[in-house]
Amino acid sequence: MTESDEQLAERLATEAGRILLDLRTAGEFEGKALGKAGDERANAMLMRELRAARPGDAILSEEEKDSATRCSFSRVWVVDPLDGTREYGEGRSDWAVHVALAIDGVPVVGAVALPGLGITLTSGAPRPLEAANQPPKMLVSRTRPAAEAVFVAERMGAELLGMGSAGAKAMAVVRGEADIYLHTGGQYEWDNCAPAAVAAAAGLHVSRADGSPLVYNCENPYLPDLLICRKEFADEALRLAGEFVPAA
């Protein structure tokens, strides 16, 4: 039986995670060299399998040379073979593998593997949302918390929770560990396409930081901001984000 798009995304994200775990366990590389080798090996497998399974689709991967010809395709796979290279190289668990399918710019299918936790979350099997945390928890970069996110958290009375990769942060909201993920520090489509698809399928609010839709397969893949959060916090988070004035 032919795999569905959801099954394919889940399988490939999970298999890439196994490659990355095995490479780290082998001890052949360390630090930045480990991250580079992991990116290359996971990407090679993902490209090979996607091209074989979906030869009529385009692919946008962080680790592949981009071409604007993909913009003429309706179906485009958006892939990050290793999201959170620093965390991976440091032996942490807050890193991820992203495999997504955007159709006409919409993140329709997504799988986010969290290999360090032994799980893969998918748009095809959304998890029921847990009860909101009290007070709400807001995710920020563990190394560079954005001033805008700190501003919003303070005014919402939210507790800040530092974490590594974008995928790990988004899935923390899906899994109920946190409630709000506001990012304004710059990302690319591969950083958030799969997380957006999984979060939307789970019933979370997903948008740009100004409330506009996330649109994929753009000629320029830079997509600098997003909000993934429980729907009951979306209006306030968007309002406060709009009130933030950067320091001169």
Image (cartoon, rainbow, N blue to C red):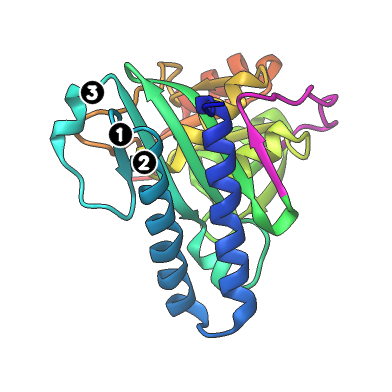
Q: What element carries label 2?
A: helix
Q: How far apart are marks 2 and 3 (CA)?
A: 17 Å
Give the overall secondary structure of the magenta segment. Answer: loop
Q: Earlier in the sequence, mark 2 or mark 3?
A: 2
* Label ID, residue 73: 3
Mark 1 → mark 2, Cα distance in angstroms: 6 Å
Q: Between marks 1 and 3, how big is the CA–CA gap?
A: 12 Å
- Please tell me whether mark 2 or mark 3 is closer to you in this view: 2
Residue 12, x across and y down, in percent? 53, 45
Relative to 125, is 10 on the left or the right? left
Task: Say what secondary structure mark 1 lies in.
Answer: loop
Q: Compared with residue 154, is residue 24 higher up or lower down, i.e. above or below?
A: below
Instruction: Return the residue nearer the eye: 151 or 7.
Output: 7
Residues shaded magenta: 119-138
Secondary structure of residue under mark 3: loop
Q: Quadrant of the C terminus?
A: top left
Does residue 193 belong to the magenta stretch? no
| Disc marking residue 52 | 2
